Structures are given as structure tokens and as C-alpha cells.
Amino acid sequence: MLSSEEIWVVLTVHILGAIIWVGGTIGLAVVIWGLRRAFPNDPETVQRVASEVARAFAWVMWPALAVTVATGLVNLSWYVPPAVNWTGVPGGEWVQTAEGLVVLMAVVAGLHTFLLGPRIRRLRTRGTPPATYASLRGLNHALEGISLVAAVLVVATMVVLGTI
């Protein structure tokens, strides 16, 4: 069992990781939205700049998510005994909702960051006409949006869970 000081440290690290992940995702979305508005006639430059900014952010974002998930599991272990039936735990449905959203968010963000993003970057580098991979870019934008919404919903479920 952890001491109250250790619990405080784990909870603080958890919240900081969530701030970096969720706040950074929102911040990145605002930056990219601003770039698209500032340069509506130069989508390729916007795409290149947004891609480089997102790649740099990934070096902070993914470790923050890993820390947040790990500390979240530790936090959960304080409140729920092992191998418990979630239907009998107050707020159990909210914990399950949050867990599902975290998995969705991580999978979607992973597809965006590690699969589609690099594929689009390779096509752009090879000089492939943008119209050729427009559907990939559209899917990638959709994944960005899903990840962002899921991140915000995770925070919302944690707020609800904190009131139970």
C-alpha cells in the first residue's frame, strides 16, 4: 500500500500527463486550424508545417499518454479491489466508459501518428499529386477529430467519476 504522499505524487503525475495529452491535443488542433485559416490558398505548405509541428509534439505526447495510462491504472487499484465485478462498484460504468474511450483514443491517435501520417508524408515527398491521396488526408483529419473528442470525453468521464 502506498503512503498518502506517494498517492499524491502518482495523482499529480497522472494529472500532468493528462494535461499534456489532452491540452496539447487541443492546442495542436487550434494551431493547425489557425494555419489552415491563415494560408487557405497554400494547403501543401500548411500540411507540411502541421506535419512537422505534430511530429515534434508526438515526442512529448506519447510518453505523456503512457505515463497517464500507467498512473491511471495505479489510481484505479486504490479504489477497486482486484478481480472485482465492475457492475457492483459505484461508478463502475464510468470507469469502463473511460477505459473504452482511452483505448479508442490511443488506437485512433496511433493510426493517425504512426500509419496514415507517415504514409501521407511519403506520398507528398515523392511528389504525388495531392488529389491522389485526398481520401487518405480526409481519413487522417477524421482520426484527428475522433482522437480529440475521445480525449475530451475521457476528461469528462473522470470529472463525473470524481463526483461519485
Image: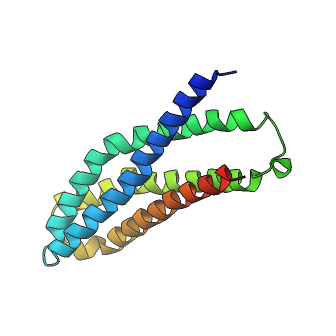
Q: Quadrant of the N terminus?
A: top right
Q: Looking at the image, which residue is at 50% across and 35% down?
A: 12
Horizontal and vertical percent position of residue 133: 29, 70
Horizontal and vertical percent position of residue 98: 63, 53
Left or right: 134, with 110 as reference point: left
Picture colour scheme: rainbow
Q: How many marks?
A: 0
Determine if residue 23 is in view. Answer: yes
Left or right: 96, with 128 as reference point: right
Q: Looking at the image, which residue is at 63% across and 50% down?
A: 99
Horizontal and vertical percent position of residue 164: 72, 52
* Placement of 118 over or under 85, stated as above or below: below
Horizontal and vertical percent position of residue 134: 30, 74
Q: Nearer the viewer, residue 34 or 91?
A: 91
Q: Nearer the viewer, residue 119 or 150?
A: 150
Rendering quarter of residue 63: top left
Q: Looking at the image, which residue is at 46% across and 60% down?
A: 147
Rendering quarter of residue 136: bottom left
Rendering quarter of residue 16: top left
Determine if residue 128 is in view. Answer: no
Q: Nearer the viewer, residue 129 or 158?
A: 158
Q: Looking at the image, which residue is at 37% across and 68% down?
A: 141
